[in-house]
Image (cartoon, rainbow, N blue to C red):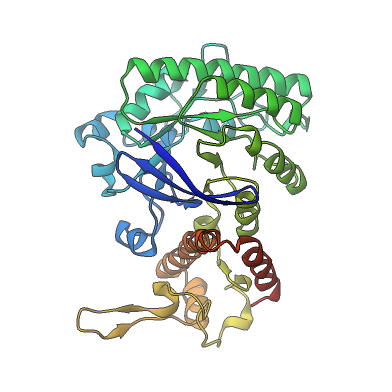
């Protein structure tokens, strides 16, 4: 179902191996996000070649489209989307939060579950911990996330109070128990992760983490961050919560973040990360490099013959080798600037390949530094390089 081994530590940082039903994942790891059953703009082959070992699927959106009957026909997501390595699916809780609307009236939360309108056709839908577990069992993801309520940073235009955050956190705990019971009833052969909530309140996070640990689940996530809070608040929770979770189980920080966030998360004991940032930013001309961020839409790149990052080995920067040994590609900043200006689809495709390669291999560099016992020295050089600028 799931095996997790920690091979080396440096401070709170951990170097491990996560064994799942569809393969082995080296940690710390970044997981590309494939919302609708695809990582936007990237073939599965490219994900394999850049070293991605696990990707995400979105339970909520896949429930909407293509629907469970289609996925059932293929025996799960892996065959449906042509991905043979491990996969994690979220529970739908974050989407229920994000679709609430400005007035919060587009969905109704009760003890039983959440009623809301389908974003596809407006149909009234009902999602519960039991239904989420049933959907994820059908998807056959290696890691299943409990159904939770994502506590908002703001409620009705003001900061969420501690009392409101407590009610939300305690509801998520009750839903975690129901998720575990249904997961067990379904005899799902994969692994169920719990999610720690509590908003920006450290005492609530501690209560949630302690109660989650009592469930003895295979792994745990820190949820409810990147929901509109200031960066300082997110970093506070990142520094506080992971060490409260069982040390012998994998820890996952949901929806975070920048390269700096990932490295900081590793230093606080996080093993797994996901974020739409590398793909979403790529589609908007924002590229991540070893030496800072690059905005390819800036006019200064119009005639720049350099690749995105001269130290990067991705197909966008260095090209690829054909079967006859000839090298093709390796694209200039000028060319990517041109593609972006013309709205050509190759532009965001190349930018996405580069950004994901950067994120995936950032974690590879972290693992190598941990293996060699020099993570703190590597971390200092990482920050110096990123501050240098492109």
Q: Nearer the viewer, residue 109 or 382?
A: 382
Q: Residue furthest top?
A: 111
Q: Let me know if residue 114 appears in the view.
A: no
Image height of 154 relative to 254, above or below: above
| Residue 193 spot, x, y in % from top left | 48, 30
Q: Quadrant of residue 327?
A: bottom left
Q: How many marks?
A: 0
Q: Quadrant of residue 201?
A: top right
Q: Nearer the viewer, residue 33 or 40?
A: 33
The N terminus sits in image quarter: top left
Image height of 325 relative to 161, above or below: below
| Residue 139 spot, x, y in % from top left | 32, 33
Report the residue at 37% width, 18% height from top. Answer: 184
Q: Nearer the viewer, residue 135 or 53?
A: 53
101 left or right of 38 in image: right
Report the residue at 50% width, 36% height from top. Answer: 249
Q: Let me know if residue 256 appears in the view.
A: yes
| Residue 280 spot, x, y in % from top left | 52, 56
Report the residue at 46% width, 35% height from top. Answer: 90
| Residue 218 spot, x, y in % from top left | 45, 30
Image height of 17 relative to 65, above or below: below
The C terminus sits in image quarter: bottom right
Q: Quadrant of residue 242?
A: top right
Q: Nearer the viewer, residue 22 or 106?
A: 22
321 left or right of 357 in image: left
Report the residue at 49% width, 52% height from top. Answer: 30
């Amino acid at each position: 179902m799931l095996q997790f081994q920690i091979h080396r530590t440096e401070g709170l940082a951990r170097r491990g191996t996560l064994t799942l039903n569809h393969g082995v994942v080296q940690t710390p790891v970044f997981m590309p996000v494939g919302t609708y059953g695809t990582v936007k703009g990237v073939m599965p082959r490219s994900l394999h070649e850049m070293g991605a070992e696990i990707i995400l699927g979105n339970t909520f959106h896949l429930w909407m489209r293509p629907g469970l009957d289609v996925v059932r026909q293929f025996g799960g997501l892996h065959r449906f989307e042509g991905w043979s390595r491990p996969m994690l699916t979220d529970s739908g809780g974050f989407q229920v939060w994000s679709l609430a609307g400005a007035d919060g009236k587009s969905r109704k939360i009760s003890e039983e579950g959440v009623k809301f309108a389908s974003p596809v056709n407006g149909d009234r839908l009902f999602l519960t911990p039991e239904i989420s577990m049933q959907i994820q069992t059908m998807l056959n993801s290696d890691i299943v996330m409990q159904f939770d309520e994502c506590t908002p940073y703001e409620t009705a235009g003001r900061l969420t109070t501690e009392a409101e955050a407590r009610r939300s956190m305690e509801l998520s705990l009750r839903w975690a128990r129901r998720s575990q019971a249904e997961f067990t009833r379904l005899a799902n052969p994969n692994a169920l992760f719990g999610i720690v909530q509590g908003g920006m309140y450290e005492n609530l996070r501690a209560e949630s983490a302690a109660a989650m640990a009592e469930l003895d689940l295979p792994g745990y996530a820190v949820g409810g961050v990147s929901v509109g809070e200031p960066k300082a608040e997110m970093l506070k929770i990142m520094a506080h919560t992971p060490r409260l979770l069982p040390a012998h189980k994998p820890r996952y920080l949901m929806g975070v973040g920048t390269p700096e966030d990932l490295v900081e998360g590793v230093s606080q004991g996080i093993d797994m990360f996901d974020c739409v940032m590398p793909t979403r930013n790529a589609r908007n001309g924002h590229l991540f490099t070893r030496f800072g961020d690059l905005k390819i839409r800036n006019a200064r790149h119009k005639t720049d013959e350099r690749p995105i990052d001269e130290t990067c080995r991705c197909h966008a920067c260095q090209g690829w080798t054909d079967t006859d040994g000839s090298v093709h590609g390796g694209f200039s900043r000028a060319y990517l600037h041109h593609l972006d200006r013309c709205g050509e689809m190759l532009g965001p495709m190349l930018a996405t390949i580069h950004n994901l390669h950067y994120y995936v291999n950032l974690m590879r560099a972290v693992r190598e530094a941990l293996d060699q016992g020099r993570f703190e020295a590597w971390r200092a050089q990482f920050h110096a390089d990123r501050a240098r600028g492109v």
